[in-house]
Image (cartoon, rainbow, N blue to C red):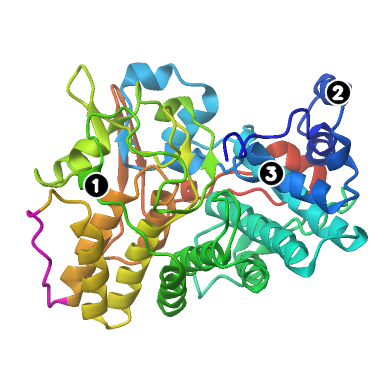
Amino acid sequence: MKNSHKPKSGSNSRFHFLLFGFLLLLSLNACRKYLDTKPDQSIATPSTIDDLEGILNAYSIINGRYPSASEVASDDFYLTPTDFNSLIDPQRFYYSWQKSPNFVGDYVSPYLAIEYTNILLESLPKVSGGDEARRNTIKGNALFVRASYHYALAQLYAKAYNRTSANSDLGIALRLTSDITVKPARSTVSETYNSILNDLQRSVSLLPPIPDLKYKSSKAAAYGMLARVYLSMSDFKNAGSYADSTLNLYSKLIDYNTLNPAAAIPFRQFNDEVIYDARAGGPQALSQAKAKTDTNLYASYAPQDLRKTILFKKNANGSMAFKGNYTGVAGASLFTGIATNELYFIKAEAAVRNGDSNKALNALNMLLFTRWKKGTFIAYNITDPKELLQVILKERRKDLLFRSLRWTDLRRLNMEPDYAKTLTRNLGTATYTLEPNGLRYVFQIDQNAVNLSGLQQNP
């Protein structure tokens, strides 16, 4: 499997140009640069099943275009004023929750991956060859990936799902065709989530239970993404059901006692907890040299909790840097895929909210048993559902750091007064605050896309 996840060399200039031209995001000079690169014809004009599978193997596009802005804006780390001032503009604005419509990367990159999936879906009926299972797997992967990127975009550019206003709140521009002459319009939040759920549910029947390669989708991955999406909608019945469906197919957990706490990279790529491997690029703000783990968060780990040493390393100044990324590489790249530990927490939270505290306790204790030094973990036996939910949410945050999940958790929990949180950044003489449900929980759309297609800008 060595290098099997690497992007195909010279593989995507035509699609880059189509998408970026569509969004009017590049100058003429930049467009010429893309056009000067010789396209890989298997992607520019796919004509065989092998060509379509080759597109799915373009890891840097299919698996590696998730946005990182939400993590830069979240509260699991802090920056010193010096490090903040050294950042490029987009990251400084994300970190300090400032209004700006002129930074395109986190908006454009997911749509590039979506463009690939639309070409896959439109090309498949025109291409002969391949048995039914092979063709279904290609279609299922394309639907899964399209849904996953639309969901990632919705966490940045649309309001959090609220059942009472979802039919009127502005969602994202759904891209369901590769035709660049079709200008996108913003859907409602309800339409956005319905499209995401529809793609995922369609993918389930097409995909194998478990993939042979973890950068490919599967029933387990689709169930896991459905659980994630339903949790973000506060639909705990469906979130719990799909979490169970995932764990019925794949439920491995890593015993942290088997890991080396001194290792610079404690987790390998495609480790035992990974169901679907995907990532966001590493922004400067989240580099180990700059991003200091929130002091209260780090202090919440008990001495016998192995996450305290496996997930973090001490900086020269005594602050803590995060090193526990499931990408298996050093640096600030974020794991954004599906892993079993996330599903155990969805199962636990959904169970307690659905009135089944015993099921919630079992899921929570099963996971935490693998995180503590052998022989030291005392299982929780909480009888009060509200207290149990608080513990589950606390442990969820401690286990799922730097995965672009925290931002969505803040957004959904802000709608519950008991869990709403005001965020504060202290940067020397400047202090920034983000109130629960504040406007900056929704990022502004790139202005070039607004100008081209007439999309309504976020306030």
Q: Main secondary structure of the magenta part?
A: loop
* Percent x, y of residue 201: 62, 72
Kind of residue sitting beneath label 1: Tyr
Name the N-terminal-most of marks 1 and 2: 2
Q: Give the Cα separation between the discs numbered 1 and 3.
A: 31 Å
Residue 154 visible? The answer is yes
Q: Nearer the viewer, mark 3 or mark 2?
A: 3
Identify the residue at image location x=46%, y=21%: 87
Question: In this rendering, would 430 be left or right of 459?
Answer: left
> Relative to the observer, which residue lies in front, 410 or 368?
368
* Residue 95 on image: x %, y %: 42, 34
Residue 95 tag number? none
Mark 2 residue type: Leu
Which region of the structure is painted magenta?
375-384
Mark identifier at residue 57: 3
Mark carried by residue 256 = 1
- Counting residues from the start of the chain, the first of labels 1 and 3 encountered is 3
Badge 1 marks a residue whose secondary structure is helix
Residue sitting at x 84%, y 23%? 37
